[in-house]
Image (cartoon, rainbow, N blue to C red):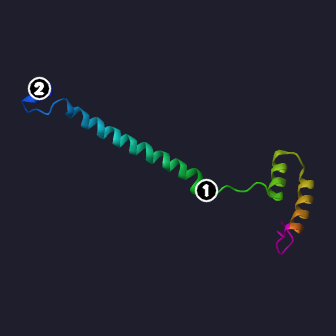
Amino acid sequence: MQTLAHFADGGPGPWILLFPLLWALVIGGTVTLLRRTVRRGRRGAWRQPVPDDSPIAVLGHRFATGEIDEDEYWRRLSVLDEQFGRTREGGAA
């Protein structure tokens, strides 16, 4: 500690403590920046949100929550399939 206190004698002085602190801040800032960037990328860039405003999606949600029963679901789905053209070759949805 004598060398740090007497930097006029040719020692590095108290400034030598600044460099490890500076490197710790740079490394910590880089890690924090990378972690935040990766989290944002997972949320938006890789997964596109599925639009839930289509009539078929709304109908499926209502059936899943129990607002309508199975017969009403299939009856309405057949009407929506005819209107939006989602029926397959066999006529099944």
Q: Is residue 48 above or below residue 34?
A: below
Circle nearer the viewer, 1 or 2: 2
* Residue 29 position within the rendered picture, expressed as x and y whole percent measured from the top left: 39, 42
Q: Give the residue at x 61% y 56%.
A: 47
Q: Residues within 10 Å of mark 1 (few under 14, many from 20)?
A: few
Image location of residue 12, percent across then percent down: 14, 34
Task: Give the vertical position of 26 relative to 2 (above or below).
Answer: below
Quarter of the picture holding the C terminus: bottom right
Question: Identity of the amino acid at label 1?
Answer: Arg
Given residues 89 and 14, the one toward you in this image is 14
Residue 46 part of the magenta-drawn span:
no
How far across and down, in percent of the image, does residue 45 sit? 57, 56
Q: Is residue 22 left or right of residue 36?
A: left
Displayed quadrant of residue 16: top left
Mark 1 and mark 2 lie on one chain; the one further toward the N terminus is 2
Outermost residue, left side: 9
Q: Which residue is mark 2?
A: 6
Q: Foreground: 49 or 30?
A: 30
Residue 47's label in the rendered image is 1
Across and down, in percent, residue 80 comes to 88, 63
* Magenta region, main secondary structure: loop
In the image, 65: left or right of 8? right
Secondary structure at numbered mark 2: loop
Q: Which mark is residue 24?
A: none
Query: Over which residues does the magenta segment extend?
Result: 84-93
The mark total stands at 2
Q: Residue at x 12, y 29 (%)?
A: 7
Identity of the amino acid at label 2?
Answer: His
Q: Secondary structure at mark 1?
A: loop
> Residue drawn at (11%, 26%), measured in percent from left and top?
6
Quarter residue 1 falls in: top left
